[in-house]
Image: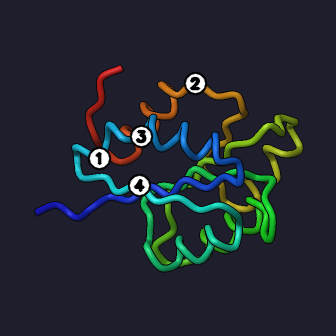
């Protein structure tokens, strides 16, 4: 049996967590486990213990911000693919994201279909939009 793929959804706004979870639920039929975290510290602990393959990571959160989480998670041996999700769309913010190891940077509001397509492609799964 194939190894379970995990996606960690991190945002301090419940609405965004629910939207992302509902968007990505379609992948559960293909063996994807969806995890959520409510702040940066929670995200870091879950990332280091559950070893997700993909993280959708908000930037502006309590306790640890997304940059701090990304930098620490990317330093781990089995670093996941990280997509930063944020309302901050300035070039400087994107550059900082790249410096801490983010693989992609998506600004809010985002298209849920795009999120689903990216997750499927990154995890090597099929999805119909």
Q: Which residue is mark 3?
A: 24
Q: Who's the residue at 67% across and 64% down the image?
A: 70
Q: How many marks?
A: 4
- x and y percentages locating residue 63 in the rendered image: 80, 71
Q: Which residue is mark 4?
A: 34
Q: Is residue 65 left or right of residue 114?
A: right
Q: Which label's residue is closer to the chain start, 1 or 2?
A: 1
Position above or below: 119 against 11: above
Position above or below: 1 against 50: above
Q: Which label's residue is closer to the chain start, 3 or 4?
A: 3
Q: Which label's residue is closer to the chain start, 4 or 2?
A: 4
- Distance CA(mark 3)–CA(mark 4): 8 Å
Q: Which residue is mark 1?
A: 28
Among the 4 quarters of the image, the one containing residue 91: top right
Q: Who's the residue at 69% across and 67% down the image?
A: 69
Contact, CB < 8 Å: mark 3 with mark 4? yes
Label 3: few (<14), some (14–19) or many (≥20) C-alpha neighbours in 10 Å: many
Position above or below: 129 against 121: above
Give SS at disc 2: loop
- Distance CA(mark 1)–CA(mark 2): 20 Å
Closer-to-camera residue (28/78)? 28
- Distance CA(mark 2)–CA(mark 3): 12 Å
Contact, CB < 8 Å: mark 1 with mark 3? yes
Give SS at disc 1: helix
Among the 4 quarters of the image, the one containing residue 15: top right
Q: Who's the residue at 68% across and 43% down the image?
A: 85
- Distance CA(mark 4)–CA(mark 2): 19 Å
Closer-to-camera residue (1/94)? 1
């Amino acid at each position: 049996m194939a190894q379970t793929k995990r996606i960690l959804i991190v945002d301090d706004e419940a609405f965004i967590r629910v939207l992302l979870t509902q968007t990505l639920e379609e992948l559960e039929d293909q063996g994807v486990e969806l995890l959520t975290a409510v702040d940066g510290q929670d995200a870091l602990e879950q990332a280091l213990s559950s070893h997700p393959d993909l993280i959708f990571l908000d930037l502006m959160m309590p306790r640890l911000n997304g940059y701090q989480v990304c930098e620490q998670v990317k330093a781990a041996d089995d670093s996941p693919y990280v997509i930063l999700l944020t309302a901050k769309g300035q070039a400087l913010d994107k550059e900082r994201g790249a410096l801490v190891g983010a693989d992609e940077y998506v600004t809010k509001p985002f298209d849920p279909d795009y999120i689903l397509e990216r997750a499927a492609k990154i995890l090597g799964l099929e999805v119909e939009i």
